[in-house]
Image: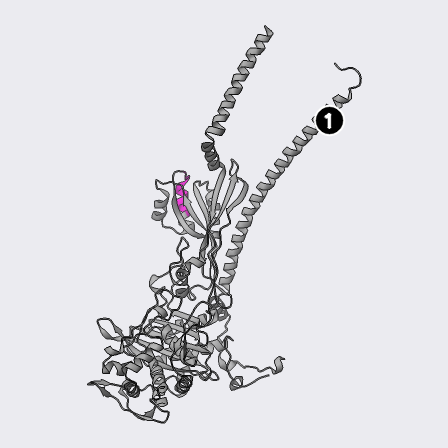
Amino acid sequence: MEIRRALLVFIVLGIGAVAVLARLFQLQILEHQKWEVLAQNIQEDLVEVPSRRGTIYDRNGVPLAYDVPAYSIAVDNFRVTNPEMLVRLLQEELGMTEEEAEARVYRQSYFTWLARNVDLDKAERFRALAQAQRIRGLLFFPTWKRAYPYGSLAIEVLGLVGVDGDGLSGLEWQFDSILRGRPRVLRILRAADGTPYDLWEESPGEPGRDLYLTLDVRMQWICESELDETLRTTPADRGCAVVLNPKTGEVLALAHSPRCDPKNPDIALLRPWAVTDVFEPGSTFKGLVALAAWDLGLVTETEYFEASSPRIVAGVAIKNANNKSYPPLRLRDALARSVNTVLVQIAQRLGAANLYEYFHRMGFGQPTGIELPGEARGILRPAEQWTEVDLAVSSFGQGVGVTAIQLAAAYAALCNEGILLRPHLLPAEPEIQGTIAKPSSCQKIREFLGYAVNTGTGSPAHVPGFKVGGKSGTAQIAIPGRGYVPGHVTTAMAAFFPWDKPQYTIVVIYQTSKTDDFWSGTTAVPSVGRIVRAMAASGVIYPPEITALGRSG
Amino acid sequence: MLHGRPNAAFWTWVLLGVLIAGLAFLYLWQGTLLARLRAERAELTLTLEKLVREKLLLEHRLREEYSPNVLAERARALGMGPADLSRIHYMEIENGN
């Protein structure tokens, strides 16, 4: 009897054990995949930490653009609690309007972005307040936000980055593949209450690579400040300045004004127009036309040119500024006084083919190759299409279209014994693009242009001890389909110093659409002088001959 | 009911039992300790991440405060003006001394 009862108990327990084993087999073997996924979903978090985008530095290692931590905040609209308070918080903390906040909170969706790339401290505060108000259903994603510690400094060159971390303009766009990295993936195991109890790296990711530029933040700031000041005190609508090292082609400053605020960007101001926009260079071209003529031996230092105004070319009267006539002038004086009618004669001696050849060698009508998107080629029509008048007016920079960077590169070649280098923003070996003239010709024209700044139209750019040389220019702006429009003027100054052994080339351009009473002598030329002075005052440059300013100590 | 002194085999079993219990305790204790340490490490890693991010933000704020525009504004507020060439003397120091 006892044995039978024991057997019964054994059989019952055995059946129970088999049932348990069968269930275990079902759970662990047959449905393993399903339950594993479910458990993972409950316990594990796969967190993708966006990689930090590379930093952009200036030539001295000063960071100009880098990523700072931020949060993107989203809401699960089906799980959200206390939505009225959430709407209020969004208005008070993240600056949304009531309609905007309500539209995001009262939606039928599992996921709605509330705000992207919110500053870290702001997001932390928002999270703390939401927790205090027992608002549930909020999702906080750690992310990065592009920051510009110097505000709008060089922003057209640096460019902007979108909310998803993609480069949208400027160098950020051009070098997006270098700057962006791969995200880091973390797996976090959480307990039932959400506390993490283990964490490991699934993928280490890779931060974006840094970019070092040739820009010098001090020169950039000096140029931008000068442009801002000129825009404030004159009718200029916009201005740009380029500083090059003529021996290497390095772009030390590429400044624009007005600039866009990176926190509230105006797309219209994001273009580095020193590279993308074309203008007629006006009398700044006279220095280059004189170089071509001197290089071919078509003019001498002692030769006098008839300088009365107007001069008739193919039935068209070509005038000097204010239709002023001069007694016969030598080339040096014609450049110093910027006499159109003399340069017309020189262009006629050169002929269209030669002048075109020299302009082409100087890099006009073709992109310089600077590392910025959207570079314009400029306008340089083939010599065969030039009329007599085209040849004449090209001598003072009409009928050709150039960019500020092309003009700067051509003047840098004049300063580099005739060797044209590719202007570049990223450190690189000097890249020779050709030879524009003989070194002796360049030396002579630089001497003439040094004289022009010492005594002539460029004198507002004169800075004692720095031997500034250069050529100014004022030109009306031709608008497609309308020709030269009154009140639209470009003023320019292409300069270098010291003229005998140049170390820097500076080009400053201003444009207005307000008045014809807008001259390089009161805008671009003094700007160059003030830029050189400011560079000296801040210790960026020193006079080539220290004794020129006197000694102390 | 046992009578008399327990024999050696009994003590061997007791010792074996104690050893197994001890090892089991050690195993469980170590497991708990490891789990706790792993949790602590996870917590600390996340805290470190957070601190690194906060540090980056503070560094950025500092850089903003030292940007040329902000410095120029501060200098102007203190009544300073830009230096000009008339106020600058370049000194030639003999032999670098």
Looking at the picture, does residue A240 appear above or below residue B56? Answer: below
Residue B22 in view in this figure: yes
Q: Label 1 is placed on what type of residue?
A: Leu
Q: Is residue A395 magenta?
A: no
Q: Relative to residue A324, is residue A232 drawn left or right?
A: right
Of A178 and A263, nearer the camera is A178
Query: Quadrant location of residue B19?
Result: top right
Residue topped by disc 1: B15
Query: Quadrant location of residue B5?
Result: top right
SS type, badge 1: helix
User: What coloring was used for the rendering?
Assistant: one colour
Of A518 and A59, nearer the camera is A59
- Image spot of residue A458 (x, y percent): 38, 83
For the point 38% across and 74% down, the residue is A230
Q: Relative to residue A193, is residue A294 drawn left or right?
A: left
- Image spot of residue A184 (x, y percent): 49, 49
- Image spot of residue A97 (x, y percent): 36, 50
Query: Quadrant location of residue B90?
Result: bottom right
Within 10 Å of disc 1 (Cα), the crowding (few <14, some 14-19, many 20+) is few
Q: Chain of mark 1?
A: B
Q: Which residues are magenta?
A: A79-89
Looking at the picture, does residue B32 appear above or below residue A67? Answer: above
Q: Relative to residue A369, is residue B26 drawn left or right?
A: right
Q: Quadrant of the N terminus of chain A?
A: top right
Q: Is residue A82 magenta?
A: yes
For the point 31% across and 72% down, the residue is A378
- Image spot of residue A258 (x, y percent): 37, 68
